[in-house]
Image (cartoon, rainbow, N blue to C red):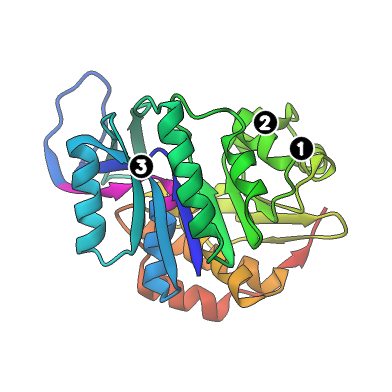
Amino acid sequence: MILTVTLNAALDVTYTVERVVTGESHRVRGVTQRAGGKGINVARVLRTLGSPVLATGLAGGDTGRSLLDELTSSGIPHEFVPIDGESRRTVAVVSANDGEATLFNEPGPEVSAAEWTAFVERFRSLASRASVVVLSGSMPPGVPEDGYAHLVSLVDGKTIVDASGPALRHAVAMRPNVIKPNARELAETTGHSELAPGISSLLRDGAQAVVASLGPEGLLAATEGASWRLAPPARLAGNPTGAGDACVAGLAAGLLAGADWPALLREAVALSAAAVVHPVAGGVDADTYAQLRATLPGARKAL
């Protein structure tokens, strides 16, 4: 089973407009609303793939109840720990003209020390039943900076961390199996503007593998002894908001299956590209996914 953790779960609202123009009024062409946050998006993609998954995290208030109700109606198994604060909302404004997405992310509710302790105990129990644990997204106020590091230390199975900044730096010291920063997060976390030294520093600090997501240029994966690179054959138009989460879902499914790195990257690239074509984060376009999965070449050695 794959366990996904979303400490800063959200109710995601996506508006589609013709074109985003700063300072102007916009007529909304379409609205979607559903449970979100990076770990939930990962769980949603895994559910689509038919992988055994359980979503956990923190949820509170009317917004929290709404997002948990949506998870139930979507058929996504979940066990969230209740908190007193109101779960956040996020808003994505997507331009139908070019697929560009503008995001507005609330910081999330304050989490008390008692609520964090309760979550850690629930997590310890759930993680004992999981073969792969995915820790992704921001941490709400009140969760300690080393929160992900502490959770990684409690896992006997394989771990993937998709975070940035201090949360990622602390987690790396606990030797997660995979970390997945994008190029910006890699630079912010390591202080290196170039890929190679940034990745090398994370490997030296404890990460067993680094998978850097590079947008249209695909993925670069590196371990202590080797590296691989793979990109989709062409740039795809659409909403890139959920591409990174679909990538993590592919990595998690591959780790569960015991796949090698070329196969892991093929799955992750196919899913992340198919997520761009899908209008809402947490989904993938089935036809694009099937086509890329069948036609992508093997990942080539890199660095």
Residue at numbered disc 3:
9
Instruction: Name the spot of residue 20 as percent of width and height, x first.
Output: 26, 32
Q: Residue furthest top?
A: 23
- On the question of residue 182 being in view, the answer is no
The mark that comes first in sequence, 3 or 2, is: 3
Q: Which mark is residue 189?
A: 2
Compared across the picture, whether 288 is left or right of 175 comes to left
Residue identifier under label 1: 198
Q: Nearer the viewer, residue 188 or 122?
A: 122
Report which quarter residue 168 is drawn in.
Answer: top right
Amino acid type at image mark 3 = Ala
Front residue of this view, candidates 238 and 41: 41
From this viewpoint, which residue is outermost toward the right?
A: 225
Residue kind at label 2, given as amino acid type: Thr
Report the predominant secondary structure element of the magenta stretch: strand
Please give the name of the residue rendered at 15% of the width and 47% of the height, measured from the top-left corner. Answer: 30
